[in-house]
Image: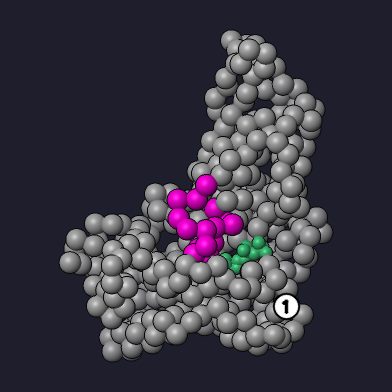
Amino acid sequence: MGAGKGMDKWILMTTARAPTNIAVIKYWGKRDETLILPLNENISVTLDLDHLSATTTVAEISLSGGRFQTCLREIRYRGEDFKDEKKGICIKKEDWQTLHVHIASFNNFPTAAGLASSAAGFACLVYSLAKLMNLKENCSQLSAIARQGSGSACRSLYGGFVKWTMGNELNGSDSLAVQLVDETHWDDIVIIIAVVSSRQKDTSSTSGMRDSVESSALLQYRAKTIVPKRMIQMDKAIKTRDFASFAKLTCADSNQFHAVCLDTVPPIFYLNNTSHRIINFMERWNHNEGTPQVAYTFDAGPNAVMLAPNRKVGALLLQRLLFYFPPPSGTEPTSYILGDTSLLEEAG
Ligand code: DP6
């Protein structure tokens, strides 16, 4: 946190960076729209900060927009006293209620690509505001605030593999993120993202899941019967680093999520032809090997997130992708955002 002193006023400032996350058991559907409480538990993997992250600077603004305001209100209310004697700054906790806050935020990846930009954005906003206002809350408690900005944002407060719990409290205070394992537990996993289209999606996650909750019987069945079992299996696969089981569950869950989208009235089409071809390619690879070598998952858009158990398979995957899905001529193969760019050399 930095503090600058102008002629007649001071500015308190905090900058934070937060990564985005990719769900391997999807969150789709809310049981409470205002508090953003999920219909089913879900699990994600947090990406590293260097590749897909949001940076936010908050200083003493008023920003319109319901979800921003909710997060800001929740943090203001928990603000603590702040004192910097050298700079002559003394802020009492009640002062946070009225101080104006300026917020500047940017993503180091195209927002239009629909790569869970709201997750990184809200996680970052909440974290930087909490630092600014000197909050005592831990990451898990902060995740319950970030959740009210965007559901998936709660999982970006932690690295590694993260679970978003259902919670029992009516006010949502226990529907928060829990870290299953940290980023060192399974650090040989390689994640490759193929930007299939950078067009803004037609149906936002928020309105898409609202339509699914209202119309899809498959979503209800998934939330009650399928996901609870999958959560147990996925938790075990992650903790034991069992890639074959992890891959099976991840692909099945992505496909079921998109089946729910098709079961929605009106149907939602997030995947395009290229996405379908990528699924086919990955499935054939796994089938030929007899046991899953690679995994794929797609969020609310056509872009593919692919996972490999180690650098060797990751390099092979990249090499095959570049061969079967060559980036349009005139563009660098940067359409593939990598967990580790040196893979490109290895693959070349
Ligand atoms: C398909 O978190 O963007 O990426 O809570 O309405 O802001 P809101 O939705 P959001 O939905 C993410 C949906 C998903 C699956 C996931 O990340 O779990």
The image quadrant where one finds ligand 1 is: bottom right
Q: Where 187 sits versus 12, above or below?
A: below
Measuring from the top left, give residue 89's x and y in whole percent.
66, 16
Instruction: List the residue tagged with mark 1.
Output: 211
Label 1 crowding class (10 Å Cα cut-off): few <14, some 14-19, many 20+? Answer: some
Hey, which residue is sitting farthest front in the picture?
A: 330
Measuring from the top left, give residue 134's x and y in whole percent.
65, 30
Q: Nearer the viewer, residue 252 or 210?
A: 210
Q: Picture quarter containing residue 306?
A: bottom left
- Residue at left offset 66%, top offset 46%: 141
Q: Nearer the viewer, residue 166 or 60?
A: 60
Task: Tell me the quadrant of the picture where the C terminus can be found.
Answer: bottom left
> Can you see residue 214?
yes
Measuring from the top left, give residue 106's x and y in whole percent.
52, 47
Say which amino acid is labelled 1.
Answer: Asp
State yes or no: residue 40 in magenta: no
Q: Picture quarter containing residue 228?
A: bottom right
Q: Where 146 sits versus 302, above or below?
A: above
> Can you see residue 78?
no
Which region shows up in magenta?
Answer: 106-120
Disc 1 is placed on an element classified as helix
State yes or no: residue 107 in magenta: yes
Relative to 143, 64 lies left or right: right
Q: Is mark 1 within 8 Å of ligand 1?
A: no
Measuring from the top left, give residue 28's x and y in whole percent.
64, 72
